[in-house]
Amino acid sequence: MHYELCLGLFMPLLGFLGLMSFSQILGRRSANIIGCSTVFISFLCFASLLYTFSNPISLTLFQWIPVSGIDAGFTLYLDSLSLMMTLIITGVGFLIHVYSTGYMDHETDYARYFAFLNLFIFAMLLLVLAQNILLLFVGWEGVGLASYLLIGFWYTRPSAAQAATKAFVINRIGDWGLLTGILLTLVLFGTVDIVEISSRVTTEYARGAPILVLLCVLYFIGAIGKSAQLPLYTWLPDAMEGPTPVSALIHAATMVTAGVYLVVRMHPVFMMAPWALHLVGIVGGLTSLFAALCALAQTDLKRVLAYSTISQLGLMFLACGIGAFYAAMFHLMTHAFVKALLFLSAGIVVHMMHGTTEMAQMGGLAKIFKKTHWLFLIGVLALSGIPPLSAFFSKEMILEQEYLAGFYTLFYVGLTTSTLTAFYLTRAYCLTFLGPLKINNSSVKEGPPAMLIPVGLLALLSISGGFLGCCGSDAILEGFLEKSDISLPEIEPTTFFTPEAIMAMIGAFLGFGSAALIYTQYRDRLGNTIQVLKNSFYINEIYWNLFAKPLAAVSRFIDAMVEPKVFDGLIQGSVQVTQGTAQALQKMQSGQIRSYVAWIALGMVFLVIYLVL
Amino acid sequence: MDISLMIFISMAMFAVGVIGVLTKRNALIFFLSIELMLNAANLLFVTFAYHWGNMTGLVWVFFVLVVAAAEAAVGLALIINLFRSKQVVDVDQYNELRE
């Protein structure tokens, strides 16, 4: 038995149950300790597993659905891919838990918040550790639930409640795809075991078989929903209604990467269906460009970061699309560090500004947030792709693989996205921290150590994380993930300064420099932001008019016409028929003996006729 | 002997009994009509017992006679009790069981 594995998985669940059961009596301090320590123990367990890790571990805790043809067990599977994911989830998750103790210090519903965070960590661990897709689906729905609960944490705000509902409903569309994909898997393979499917798919099906393409597309629909890609991305910007640490943990660092994880986990199947992979790449590329354009004009600091997340997830899918799963995972890791850093340092500002997220009300905050603005700047530089910070390596690797694989259009899409990323992040930094100071309130001051220390650690990871996975073919992360058969399709270039790398660097510096110039020198002369980009091409409005309104109209029609006439009519009719028959039959029971006798005689006559005929 | 005549008489007796039950309101006539129907059946039993040379039908007649005698005792007692309650023997007056 692998006790570390079980302990690591179930500690957050215990934390959730404990916090939920005693939420009324737990004090602020004890809720802090329970919430953070469970995740920290979980992190230590997985760290010790990393130390002793050699071969994939498969651990069946019990038979879950022992039906022949499905035969799903509660089976955990720990290979290098899921181990890496668990370390990101619990590591970043722990830092965000610690940060939350500072961020939520004015909240009354303290234990509930930590309970939901622990529930999320548990569900996410279950998702990445599941050996069969059905168990993965349990985790998948679990993170969706936790996300719903946390977006709607301030449930008294109508906008938060609405955003939570929206996230839940749009995720259902994606879940439909995943669930249908699971059913199709059962039909095709007769099992839901991912390891078994991965080994059997290469021998049992021809490369590019249409049914496999369908299967992969269904899985990818699930991934689109969870990872907020086009056309199901609309829930993620609205999800910023939740507390900022939640945005950092769930809607940037971990949960939204579940879609990428699903594609990477199922990569043997995807590799057998090149058309599906192309679709993944194209959707990823389009989304990354689209979201980067939208991020250019956002006036809300958290929304800039939300669109940036969508854009970076698009880049990961772009990498998956050419089979560079290692590049996708590498970018997933660096993005988790950097985006958590950006969100959390933005969160310090938001928290100290009493909940304001509008950049128009900020400006010049570098004078007040002397440490935070450096941390935010590190995040901006890292995600912009300025060497030698972490996301530069991962992003450059994606672009390089794109180029080597010969997808030049997608390469230029990625390059444009990368340049735009540098531009909008620098814009956000300048609007928030530079320029004249706009607030005149002495209560706004630098965040407490409980918030600064985790952010500082994330900044260190953002600076150094890139060296884990790059610099030659003997990178630590690459060798580690190769154990799970996740690598790069092309031979890596021999020199480091390939033309693509130089182009990527020029793009990053160009975006950074132009934004820095425009938003420091000419900021007073800039007009309003471009409305079409700010409203993300009116996609929300289009969906509203295309789907929500007709649906509402149909519902109203049913409410006004079908409901009273058809359904009520059916019910009323059956009542009337019963009553009518009863009244008719009641007349027979007159109490008159002679009429009874007449009925008996009549019955006899019919009986005789029946018997004779 | 032609049994069709006897069957005809039996059916006629039964029909008279049924019509009596359906039309007469006096409980005694009602009762009498029932006896008439029983005896119509008895007549049929005897006829067929004679026709087939089988004694079973004759045995059944005795059964019916015994039951009819018992029934007469109970039935007359019922009628007397009904008369005591309402001073009439009109069966249409006794419809309290309707409720």
Image (cartoon, rainbow, N blue to C red):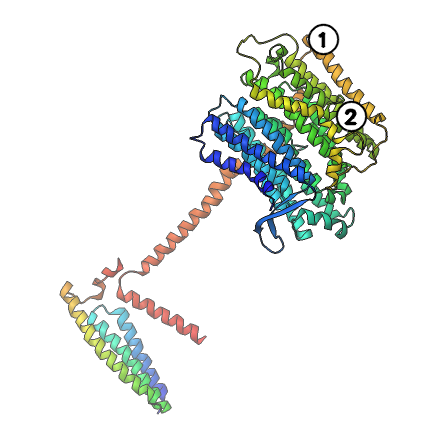
The answer to which quarter of the image holds residue A353 is top right
Q: Residue A33: where, in percent of width, then height? A: 51, 29
Residue at (43, 75) in percent of width and height: A611
Q: Residue A220: in sight, yes or no?
A: no
Asked if marks 2 and 1 fall on the same chain, the answer is yes
Amino acid at pointer 1? Gln
Chain ID at mark 1: A
Compare residues A474 and A571 and report the one nearer the observer.
A474
Marks 2/1: CA–CA distance: 26 Å
Residue located beneath label 1 in the image: A521
Q: Residue A561: where, in percent of width, then height? A: 50, 39
- Neighbour tally class for label 1: few under 14, some 14-19, many 20 plus, Cα within 10 Å: few
State left or right for residue A197 relative to residue A587.
right
Q: Residue A248: in sight, yes or no?
A: yes
State left or right for residue A575 relative to residue B96.
right
Q: Is label 2 in a helix, a strand or a loop?
A: helix
Amino acid at pointer 2? Leu
Chain ID at mark 2: A
Residue located beneath label 2 in the image: A415
Residue at (79, 34) in percent of width and height: A474
- Neighbour tally class for label 2: few under 14, some 14-19, many 20 plus, Cα within 10 Å: many
Compare residues A112 and A236 and report the one nearer the observer.
A112
Query: Which of the two discs, 2 and 1, labels the residue nearer the N terminus?
Result: 2
The answer to which quarter of the image holds residue A422 is top right
Q: Looking at the image, do the residues carrying marks 2 and 1 touch, with CB atoms under 8 Å apart?
A: no
Q: Residue B78: where, in percent of width, then height? A: 19, 70
Compare residues B10 and B82 and report the one nearer the observer.
B82
Residue at (62, 29) in percent of width and height: A92
Q: How many marks?
A: 2
Vertically, is A267 above or below B90?
A: above
Residue at (65, 47) in percent of width and height: A58
